[in-house]
Image (cartoon, helix red, strand yellow):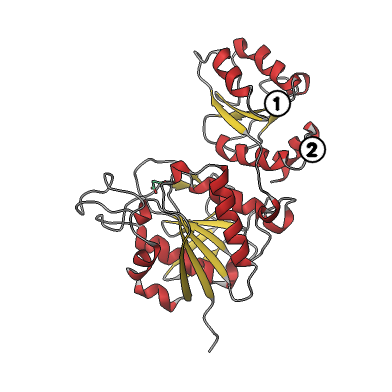
Amino acid sequence: MTAKPNIVVIGTGGTIAGQGKAAVNTSAYLCSVLGIDEILDAIPHAFALANLRAEQLLQTGSENFNNDHLLVIGKRVAELLARQDVDGVVVTHGTDTIEETAYFLHLTLKSSKPAVVVGAMRPPSAMSSDAALNLYDALAVAAHPSSRSMGTLVVANNEIHSARDVVKSNSFKLEAFHSPYGALGYVIEGEPRYYRRPARAHTLDTPWSVETLDVLPKVDIVYAYGALEAQAVESIAANARGLIYAGTGNGNVARHLVDMLCNAARRGVQVVRASRTGAGIVLRNGAQPDDDYGWLTVDDQVPQKARLLLTLALTSSADRRALQAVFERY
Ligand code: SIN
């Protein structure tokens, strides 16, 4: 008989740690109230999958997570994965920004051991809560050898998603998580089944390690609409090293904002064209002459993930060509 793997479960809050007054409260409830021990104790079957150790790192809604929270979570996960007596880590997390924390880990952990981030759309107290099964599945994924070298994974609704691709795309339904090219695989009866591998570089194949990062450069996002005023964009760009412009359609920029964004780029702000549509490619020199304007484009990344990628890229280079190459590699 082979020994069970050792998995550490880190609690950070969210709906998976939430509690409503009644079972019918599927959308109105308190977040981040149950401790990670309580959450785990509610699924005793999970202890058959692995030797579990729980750790309460944070207890707050993921809408509050800033760059410092990402570093705190990342450093703790890295520390745990480096230990010989740890085979994998599961982070329980609010779903609002689960894709951002997971992507940050995907780009900055230096380990091939599984790191899985999991949340729930309904608290454990609600009818048809997804909390218990999502966590059980996440533990099954983290405990399984086939999950090694896959980068950071997000598990929800019996699906295993790559942290690079997954996006929360519904505000309240259980089927809230979507990857534009599909999930990597399924979890069925406590076992992961993979059908694909992540195509873009991650974890051991990136130049960034969370262990050596202490301060992250400021990168902001601007959401475009026709009546957006140049002054509003200017005031955001004034304090940032990078600006993700979530443009309309294929990253279009309204005429009255072009000069302002070109000036920002001349001052050294990295202006990156993205799309507010939530999917698809923003083609370099497509909708705008990016070479002439000194702008960058995101390839297929959604604005919130482009922000993280540029943030990390700026820790290693300020060269525009190198920064553009990052969007095409990761
Ligand atoms: C949060 O992101 O912390 C709140 C919402 C959720 O977990 O679903």
State the image coordinates of residue 287 (x, y, percent, origin top left).
66, 21
State the image coordinates of residue 117 (x, y, percent, origin top left).
50, 57
State the image coordinates of residue 45 (x, y, percent, origin top left).
37, 75
* Nearer to us in this view, 277 or 325: 325
Q: Which residue is situated farthest in the top direction here?
A: 256
Residue highlighted by disc 1: 269
Q: Is residue 152 left or right of residue 263?
A: left
Mark 1 or 2 closer to N-term?
1
Q: Residues within 10 Å of mark 1 (few under 14, many from 20)?
A: many
Residue 166 in view here: no
Q: Amino acid at mark 1?
A: Val
Q: CA distance from mark 1 to mark 2?
A: 15 Å
Element class at badge 1: loop
Q: Is residue 206 left or right of residue 165?
A: right
- Residue at the image point whose x is 68% and y is 60% from the top: 110
Q: Is residue 115 left or right of residue 200?
A: left
Residue highlighted by disc 2: 322
Foreground label between 1 and 2: 1
Element class at badge 2: helix
Give the label on residue 97, or none: none
* Nearer to us in this view, 269 or 48: 269
State the image coordinates of residue 29 (x, y, percent, origin top left).
27, 47
Q: Amino acid at mark 2?
A: Ala
Q: Residues within 10 Å of mark 2 (few under 14, many from 20)?
A: few
Q: Which residue is situated farthest in the bottom direction here?
A: 1
Q: Is residue 319 above or below residue 57?
A: above
Ligand 1 neighbours mark 2 (CB distance < 8 Å): no
